[in-house]
Structure formats: structure tokens, C-alpha cells
Image (cartoon, rainbow, N blue to C red):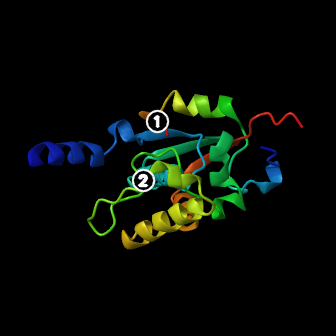
Amino acid sequence: MNIKMEDIIPEASCLGATAFLDVASRADVALFV
Amino acid sequence: MTATIDATMNQILSAPEEGKPKSLALVASKGGLDQVYPVLIMASTAAALGWDTHVFCTFYGLDIVHKKRNKKMKVAAVGNAASPPPLQGREFRVPAFLGILPGMNSVATWMMKSWMKKSNIPDIEEMMQICLESGVHFYACPPPSGS
């Protein structure tokens, strides 16, 4: 895919899967779209 | 039926328990125009309801947070048995094999965009702006590229 991090909008976090899983584990609703 | 819908809506819109807002976690792994709209519609709606909303963008879903690619999203003309949408109330089905013709992705994209415009749904850029202004958190997680 060759995506460089400078191509990503600055508002997006680059913390990765671990940070998201921490949030998702406490979410009321989690969806895979 | 109406009572059930009302009860469900009241439950959804009710004040959060113990002062804690409800939260939504979405994983977006696809980058087609028709696949990104549901993510952004759900995220913006949840954020508008005051929910703490997080969207994890990975693989082709990274196009959502890509500065250039989120302006060039397309609809695939093949692989969707339900496309194109009904036009002016008429059922209209294009034979699947026509999807392989050059330019059919652009036609499908044009149809999808005009459908959204007629339905007063903002384009992807505007939806992203709404999400960001509403406080939706996006996570960009590129897959290993091997390069």
C-alpha cells in the first residue's frame, strides 16, 4: 500500500491497534464496518 | 411498532448513566466510496448524540484519513449484486459482466455521488470535517508495507 505517515491527516492518531483496543474494550458498541 | 421505535430512540437519546457518555468503536478496513459512507455516517451520528466515538482505520480504510486519497474514492462496478441504486423509483439492474468495461467504476462513482447529493448527504470531505469538528477520534494504522 506504501502509505507514508505524512500523507495522513494530522488529526488522526498514530497510536496503533493497542491504543484502539484499549478504547474498544470499554466501548458500549463496537462494529467492524 | 411506532411505540417500540419511540422507546428505543428514548433509550438511545437518554442521559448517559453516571455522567459517562456512551462510546462507539468502529473498525474501518475498506476504502470504497460506498463502504466509507456507512463509517462516517455512523461516526458523525454517534458524535452528534454526544457519544465518545473512535474509528480505527486500517488497510484500505486508511484512505479515510489519507489527505489525497479521501478525495478520490470510487465505487467498484463489479462485486456488488445490489448496485446500482434504484433510479427515480425504478428498479434498474446492470448485467454484472458490463462492470468490467473501462470507465464503469467512474460511472458507478458518478451515480453514487449523485444519489448522495439528491439525498442531501454531504460528500466525503464534508463528512470528515463534520466528524473532526464533532470530536470523532481517528486512528491510522498502516499495515506493514514490506518496503
Q: Secondary structure at mark 2?
A: loop
Q: Would you place residue B68 above or below residue B25 in this image?
A: below
Q: Nearer the viewer, residue B77 or B9?
A: B77
The structure residue drawn at horizontal position 17% and vertical position 46%, both measured from the top left corner, is B5
Query: Is the residue marked by circle 2 packed among few (<14), some (14-19), or many (20+) residues within 10 Å?
Result: some
The residue positioned farthest toward the right in the image shown: B147
* Amino acid found under the numbered disc labelled 2: Ser
Subunit bearing disc 2: B
User: Where, by quadrant of the figure, is residue B33 drawn?
Assistant: bottom right
The structure residue drawn at horizontal position 47% and vertical position 33%, both measured from the top left corner, is A27
The answer to whether the residue labelled 2 contacts the one labelled 1, judged by CB atoms less than 8 Å apart, is no
Q: Position of residue A20 (x, y in %)?
A: 61, 34
Q: Position of residue A32 (x, y in %)?
A: 50, 35
Residue A31's disc is 1
Q: Nearer the viewer, residue A26 or B106?
A: B106
Q: Secondary structure at mark 1?
A: strand
User: Is residue B81 left or right of B58 when viewed as pictured?
Assistant: left
Q: Would you place residue A14 above or below residue A20 in this image?
A: below
User: Is residue B140 left or right of B121 when viewed as pictured?
Assistant: right
The quarter of the rendered structure image containing the N terminus of chain A is top right
The structure residue drawn at horizontal position 52% and vertical position 27%, both measured from the top left corner, is A25
Subunit bearing disc 1: A
Any part of residue B39 in sight: no
Measured in 3D between alpha carbons, the distance from the residue under mark 2 to the one under mark 1, in whole angstroms, is: 23 Å
* Amino acid found under the numbered disc labelled 1: Leu
User: Where does label 2 land, which residue?
Assistant: B83
Query: Is the residue marked by circle 1 packed among few (<14), some (14-19), or many (20+) residues within 10 Å?
Result: few
